[in-house]
Image (cartoon, helix red, strand yellow):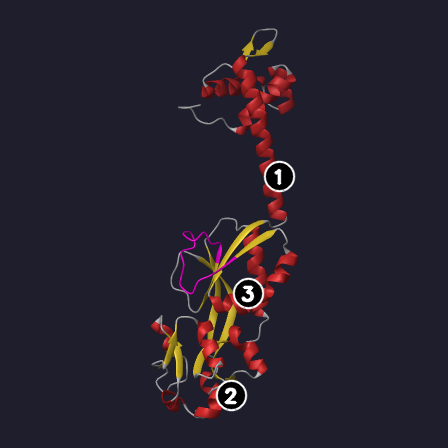
Amino acid sequence: MSGHDAPQSAELRLFVAVVECGTISAAAEQLGVAPSVVSRTLSRLERKLGTTLLSRTTRRMELTEEGRFALERARVILDQMDALEDSLASRREQPVGRLRVDAATPFMLHALVPHVPAFRRLYPQISLQLNTSDQIIDLLEQRTDIAIRIGRLADSTLHARSLGMTPLRLLASPDYLARAGTPRSVAELPRHSLLGFSRPESLNTWPVRQPDGGGLVITPTLSASSGETLRALALAGEGIACLSGFMTDADLAAGALVPVLPNAMKGAAQEINAVYYRHSQLALRIRCFLDFMQQKCGTASA
């Protein structure tokens, strides 16, 4: 078909109908169109394919050799198109397919993985692929459907769904506070071992209440690139860290970590957003995951 437009499925269906009905008038009656429409469409299909499909006389029509070959291929194509439409319809009703989700390691371990069994019971035909990255990724380059972002979003071409807020707290182990003492004011913090991020630097501005209304810029005594590493260091008694609630609620409940200067951190929180590319019609598997995580994060402790 080089040099010609690909035939439309409607033209192929009409060609098959003419062959099965035996005449143009019978096919026209079956399709609910005028015989002249059938004749013109058949001629247009033959021009596109560059060959005669049917030898037409006043009394009868016969398939040419090329017509028999085209009929066989047309039936296969139309069957595949019908199967595709059925498959897409079933996907709209029951979410299926691979779903690639990217999140920072702490969120993946503490806020997402615990809910995976429930999600898989609800949607057994969705194949989850969970990837961790502590850096901002390119969704298209990484072939990712959804990325979970913690903190304020930069201006973006991506669409975002809020999954809620997570509190920020200053935390330390009882062992560390027994050794180093419990700070009674923000001014005492620089005299302590402070656990901060090696990158990005912006995460080393703690949202504690300051007289000027700004945050407290710390110089870490010990730094790491991952929040999960900082949590492990805090649990090991290495100092005070500023960590999100989603990754430390269980530690608080167990008494493994305790709040430091809770009044100075009152109201401090981070946004949790799921980002994805805008689609005119969002794939059902993506929408189901967003709805599920929004419910789970919304009912988490704040």
Residue holding disc 1: 86
N-terminal of the pair, mark 3 or mark 2, is 3
Residue holding disc 2: 174
Could you say which quadrant of the image residue 73 lies in?
top right
Between disc 1 and disc 3, the foreground one is 3
Where is residue 239? Give x, y as percent.
43, 84
Say which element carries label 1: helix
Give the amino acid type for the residue marked by disc 2 in the picture: Pro
Local crowd at mark 1 within 10 Å, few (<14), some, or many (≥20)? few
Give the amino acid type for the residue marked by disc 3 in the picture: Leu
Give the amino acid type for the residue marked by disc 1 in the picture: Asp
The residue most toward the top is 58
Q: Is residue 168 above or below residue 18?
A: below
User: Over which residues does the magenta segment extend?
Assistant: 130-146
Between disc 3 and disc 2, the foreground one is 2
Between disc 2 and disc 1, the foreground one is 2
Figure quadrant of the C terminus: bottom right
Residue 301 numbered tag: none
Q: CA distance from mark 2 to mark 1?
A: 60 Å
N-terminal of the pair, mark 1 or mark 3, is 1
In the drawing, does residue 163 fall left or right of residue 203? right
N-terminal of the pair, mark 2 or mark 1, is 1
In the drawing, does residue 185 fall left or right of residue 94? left
Q: CA distance from mark 3 to mark 2?
A: 28 Å
**Going 39% across and 85% down the picture, which residue do you hit?**
193
Residue 243 covered by magenta stretch: no
- Give the overall secondary structure of the magenta segment: loop
**Going 50% across and 71% down the picture, which residue do you hit?**
165
Asked whether 262 or 116 is in front, the reply is 116
Say which element carries label 2: helix
Say which element carries label 3: helix
Where is residue 20? Give x, y as percent.
64, 19
